[in-house]
Image (spheres, coloured by chain):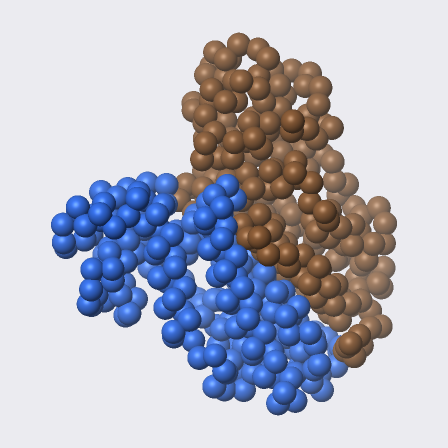
Chain colours: A brown, B blue
């Protein structure tokens, strides 16, 4: 039985209830096998409400992606609350978490499928463009704060952010599309990048 | 009109002709809208041959992915032919090529869609596991040769390879699923990683 994230547990209005049902159906069936009927199966209210609000499966899924992004916007503080170094590590810990729980894997499988829709669907592409811009700005803020505090070198925050985010997209994608386990290796090298490129006072001497 | 890569231009047997038709149909329609009929439209021989050889669209596409991987295996020399540093740069140049031609973009859109199938289809996951292992070994060989020649530091070749490959997966994925242009930024930081982490004799001093 798939568990929903805490913020979806007790929906207070119809949209939240629809979002919860979409989350569950998406995790259980993936994108390709998802139907409005399968979302309705997870929805305690009348199925006609789904058809009333949405113009089909993709319309609903695009609203779901928007909802998840809004949640991230609200949840994540604009300014880092810990040292930039710790903050970056906390983000990496979330992305690289091991072992991967079934729920987390199911959700990321679905997200990789949804992102792939952006290859041929402009509406999905618009969403992932905005979503990537949000997370890039998030990383750039952390890097900027690290520079201000003298923890990080005077790097280009936007460029560093684009790079970190791209590596993380690669991690999430490979993690749910292959059976290989590259997580520990990638994390160690990402930490090396941060150490050598960002951390003030570190030298190029390898730890090995 | 989509152009096929040189090795697909003049198919000499039925399988090659099927692979060429699949390549064209996949680039023109993407995965979701692809049908055996659309592949047949690009195929000069009898459509019944397609049904005779393949048990549906995914069976054909899995054979196509295998065919493309075989081609890479044959094309890429097992041992680097230039200095490890130049070799790595040549690979990056291919991945980061700008401007992105329409044909190249269409092909990569389709590849991102095919990889996303691996989220819920074991056969695709098996393929991308083997494909990723092949490219990881390719990168590891380049790194190993760089260490042997004293061009690179004594890093862990497998770990470095896993990292480079993951970043590149992120690049290909983001490039065809968003409208943003992060290519130059990501390339600059990837070059910095190589400089600071791999190149012997380099120090941690930033170039900025």
Q: Quadrant of the C terminus of chain B?
A: bottom right
Residue B149, image x, y percentages = 62, 90
The picture places residue B128, in percent across and down from the top left corner, at 49, 56
Please tell me in which quadrant of the rendered image residue A75 appears.
Answer: top right
- Relative to the observer, which residue lies in front, B137 or B151? B137
Whole-percent x and y of residue A204? Answer: 76, 78
State the residue lying farthest toward the front: B52
Q: Is residue B179 visible?
A: no
Residue A178 visible in the current orientation: yes
* Residue A99 as seen in the image, left or right of residue A35: right
Residue A190 in which image quadrant: bottom right
Q: Check the image and report above or below for B181 versus A205.
A: above
User: Which residue is drawn at the image coordinates 52% and 18% (left, top)?
Assistant: A40
Where is residue B200 drawn, in percent x and y? Answer: 69, 85
In the displayed structure, A193 sits above or below A57; it is: below
Position above or below: B113 against A85: above
Q: Residue shown at 65%/15% (left/top)?
A: A13
The vertical placement of B120 against A18, above or below, is: below
**Label total for image:** 0
In the foreground, B121 or B182: B121
Considering every residue shown, the one lying at the far bottom of the view is: B149
Quadrant of the rendered image containing residue A140: bottom right
The structure residue drawn at horizontal position 45% and vertical position 42%, both measured from the top left corner, is A117
């Amino acid at each position: 039985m798939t568990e929903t994230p805490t913020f979806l547990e007790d929906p207070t209005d119809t949209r939240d209830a629809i979002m919860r049902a979409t989350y569950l159906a998406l995790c259980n069936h993936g994108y390709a096998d998802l139907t409005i009927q399968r979302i309705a199966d997870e929805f305690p209210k009348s199925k006609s409400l789904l058809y009333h609000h949405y113009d089909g499966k993709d319309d609903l899924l695009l609203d779901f992606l928007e909802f998840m992004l809004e949640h991230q916007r609200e949840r994540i503080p604009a300014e880092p609350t810990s040292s930039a170094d710790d903050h970056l590590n906390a983000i990496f810990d979330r992305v690289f978490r091991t072992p991967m729980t079934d729920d987390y894997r199911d959700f990321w499988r679905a997200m990789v499928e949804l992102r792939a829709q952006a290859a041929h669907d402009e509406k999905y592409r618009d969403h992932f463009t905005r979503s990537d811009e949000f997370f890039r700005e998030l990383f750039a803020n952390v890097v900027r704060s690290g520079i201000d505090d003298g923890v990080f070198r005077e790097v280009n925050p936007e460029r560093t952010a684009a790079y970190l985010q791209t590596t993380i997209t690669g991690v999430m994608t490979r993690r749910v599309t292959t059976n290989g386990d590259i997580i520990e290796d990638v994390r160690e090298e990402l930490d090396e990048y941060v150490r050598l490129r960002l951390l003030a006072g570190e030298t190029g001497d390898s730890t090995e």
